[in-house]
Image (cartoon, rainbow, N blue to C red):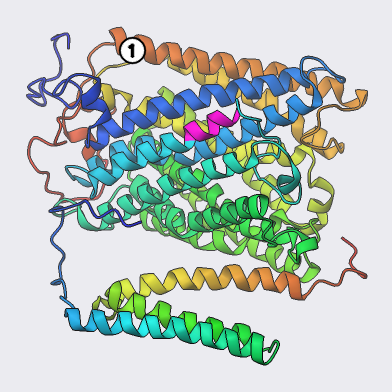
Amino acid sequence: MSASTHTASHTSGEVNYINEFKGLKSWFTSLDHKRIGLLYMISVLFFFLVGGLFALLIRLELFKPGAQYLTPDQYNQVMTYHGAIMVFMVIVPGIPAILGNFFLPLQIGAKDVAFPRLNLTSWYVFMLGAIIAICTLFLGKIDTGWTFYTPYSIKTGTAATMMVVAAFVMGMSSILTGLNFIVTVHKLRAPGMTMFRIPLFIWAIYSTAVLQILATPVLGITLLLLAMERTFGVGIFDPNLGGDPVLFQHFFWFYSHPAVYIMILPAMGVVSELIAAFSRKTIFGYTAIAFSSIGIAAVSFFVWGHHMFVSGQSEVAGIVFSFLTMLVGVPTAIKMFNWLSTLYRGNISFESPMLFALGFLFLFAIGGVTGIMLATIATDVHFHDTYFVVAHFHYVMVGGTLMALMGGLYYWFPKMFGKMYNETLARLTFVLIFIGFNVTFFPQFILGAMGMPRRYFDYIPAYQSLNSISTIGSWLIGCGFLLSLYVIVTALRSGEKASDNPWGAKTLEWQTSSPPPHTNFHVEPVVTAGPYEYK
Amino acid sequence: MAANNHSEHQSAGHGHHIIPAEIYKKVALALFVLTLLTVGFHYLFHSVMHGSVLAAPVAFLIAAVKASLVLMFFMGLKYDSVDNRIIFALGFFFLFVLIFFSALDIWTRVAVTSTL
Ligand SMILES: [Cu+2]
C-alpha cells in the first residue's frame, strides 16, 4: 500500500484482491480463489505449527533412553497427533489447497475456479473436520497412530471414533477440491491455452485431483466401517464376528498409498516450475513430465500391498505387490532425469526458491531409492516397522513435499502479496532446514538398520548417540521454520514492493500485476506459446 | 451430496437432454418393484428354503440392476457423452482393482507354510 516506485510494466492501479474488499466478513465469505488460498494458507500453517510442536516433543522424549517428560501413554498420543495432523491437515491439503487454489486459475488464464462456492465450502468442510480432530485432544485423546489399524483401533477406549469422523470430513473436503480443479482445467483455460501449453504445476495438480476423487472415497468408507464396528459391532474387521483385520489394511492403503502421491505430485509440479524458472531454460521433456504425473497417479492404485508384507498377507500377493511397486520407479525416474537435463547448461541462479528445489532433488532421490529397498520383500521383512521406514517417508514427505511447499511459497510470495522478502534470511532458512533435516533423519536410517523399532516410547542404550543427534537436528529444523515465519511476517509488514515478474518467469501468473486484481487479469490473456519458452 | 449451487458458470458444449417425467415415473416404479422383489427373494431363501447359496448372488444382481437404472436415467448417463460414461466406468474399474487384489491376498493365504 505504500505507493513507492515500481517497474513500469503494468499500470496496476493499486486495486487488487487484497484491498478491494475490506473487513473480516469479506474474507470469510469470499468466493475469490486467491483469498480462499490464503484462508487455507493460514489454517494449514497453523496446523503445521501444532504438528511440529508434537514432533519436537517426540524427539525430546527420545533424546535419552528411559522416561523423560512423557508417560508411555502420552507418548503414543503425541505420536498419533503428530502423524494425523501432519498427514490429514498439513501435507495432503498443503500444496493443492494453498498454491493450487491460488495459482491454478492464474496459470491457465481463468478468472476463478469452476465452482467458487464449492471452493469456499471445501474450506469450511476442512475446518469442520480439523475442529473435530482438535476436539479429540480434550475429549479422550487417541493413541492408534495415524493409520487407525485394527484390531487395536476397535478396542482402544479413547476418542478414535471422533478422530475417524474428522478424517472422513476432511477427506470430503479433499474430494470437493479435486472435483473443482478437474472441471476448472477442462473448462476454463484461456484462449490458446491447450492441454499441452498448461504449466507442469497444473498437470501435477490435475493428476492429484484425479487421485483425490478416486481414492479418497475408499478412505471415507473404510473409516465409516471402522466407526460402525466400534459403535454397533458390525463384523467387518473383527475375526470373532467373521471379519478380517488385514482387510482394514487393504482398504486403508488402497487410499493411503495413492495419498502419498496426493502429497508428492503437487510438490513435483512446484519443482518443475522452479527448475525451469531458475535455469532460464525451456524445460526438458515437457510431455514426458506431464505424462509421468498421470503415470504415477495410475500406477499408485496397484501397489498398496507393499505396506503389508509382514501383516499376514499371502506370499503370492506380496510378490505381486512387490513387483508392481517397482513400476513406480519408472515415471518417477523420468521426472528426475528430465529435471536434471533441464539444469544441464541452464543459466542457473540460486535464489531461495531454487535452493529448496535443489534440496528437493537431493532429498527426494534418497527417499525414492530407500523406497525401492522397502519395496523389495527380502529387505522389507527386516526394515519393516523400524526407524528405516520412518526415515524413508520423512525424506519423501518432508524432504520432498515440505521442501517444495517452502520453495513454492518463496517463489510465489511476491505475486501473492506484492512484497519482497529478505533474500539473505530466506536462504538462511533453507540452510537451517536442509541441514537440520539431514541431521534429524539420516541417523534414523542407521538406527532402523540397527533394528530400532518405530513408534516405541523407549529404546536400549545402544541407540542413544544417534537418537541424541536426531533430536538436535529437530531443533535446527524448528529454528529454520521459526526464521521463515519471521521472514514472511517482516516481508508482509515492511517488505519492498515486488515487481510484476521478479524472477523473469514465463507462466501466465507473472503477466498480471502483483498482487493480482480480483478478476486476475486486466485483459483476458491470449496464449500463443508454451509455458517455458526461455531463449 | 451433490452441491448444485453453481448457476451460470459454464454452458456445456452439448445440450442438456431433458428426460420426460413419464420415464422418471416408470423408472421409480421399476425401482420400487425391484425392492419388493429383493424382499420376496429374501423371504423365499431364508424363511422357506432355510438358506441357499443363491441368496447373495440374487440380491446383488437385483441391486446391480437398480443401480444401473439410477445411473442411466436419474443421473442421465444414458444420454451423456461417451467420455463421461468412460470416466464413470473408470470408478468401477478401480473398485474392481480394490476387490481383486484384496481377494488375491485372502484366497492365496497358506498360513502353515508361510515363511513370512
Ligand atoms: Cu505405499
Front residue of A505/B19: it is: B19
In the displayed structure, does residue A223 sit left or right of residue A116? right
Identified at 18% across, 78% down, the residue is B19
- At horizontal 48% and vertical 29% (from top left) the residue drawn is A356
> As drawn, which residue projects farthest toward the front?
B47
Q: Circle 1 sits in a helix, a strand or a loop, which is it?
A: helix
Could you say where residue A383 lies in the image, as x and y percent from the top left?
80, 46
Q: Relative to B23, say whether A487 is above or below.
A: above
Residue A13 lies left or right of residue A512; in this view the side is: left
Q: Residue furthest bottom?
A: B49
Can you see residue A121? yes
Horizontal and vertical percent for residue A259?
54, 49
Q: Position of residue A491 (x, y in %)?
A: 33, 12
- Please name the residue shown 40% across and 52% down the image: A209
Tell me residue A354's x, y (percent): 43, 29
In the rendered image, which quarter is residue A249 located in?
Answer: bottom right
Question: Looking at the picture, which amino acid does disc 1 mark?
Answer: Ala
Determine the chain carrying the residue at label 1: A
Of A474 and A215, nearer the camera is: A215
Report the span colored magenta: A130-137
Report the residue marked by disc 1: A491
Question: Left or right: A266 with respect to A473?
Answer: left
The reply to whether the magenta stretch includes residue A320 is no
Quarter of the figure that contains the C terminus of chain A: top left
User: Residue at point 55% right, 54% down?
Assistant: A219
Disc 1: residue Cβ within 8 A of ligand 1's nearest atom: no
- Residue A257 in sight: no
- In the displayed structure, A533 sits above or below A228; it is above
Residues packed near mark 1 inside 10 Å, few (<14), some (14 to 19) or many (20 plus): many
Quadrant for the N terminus of chain A, please: top left
> Majority secondary structure of the magenta segment?
helix
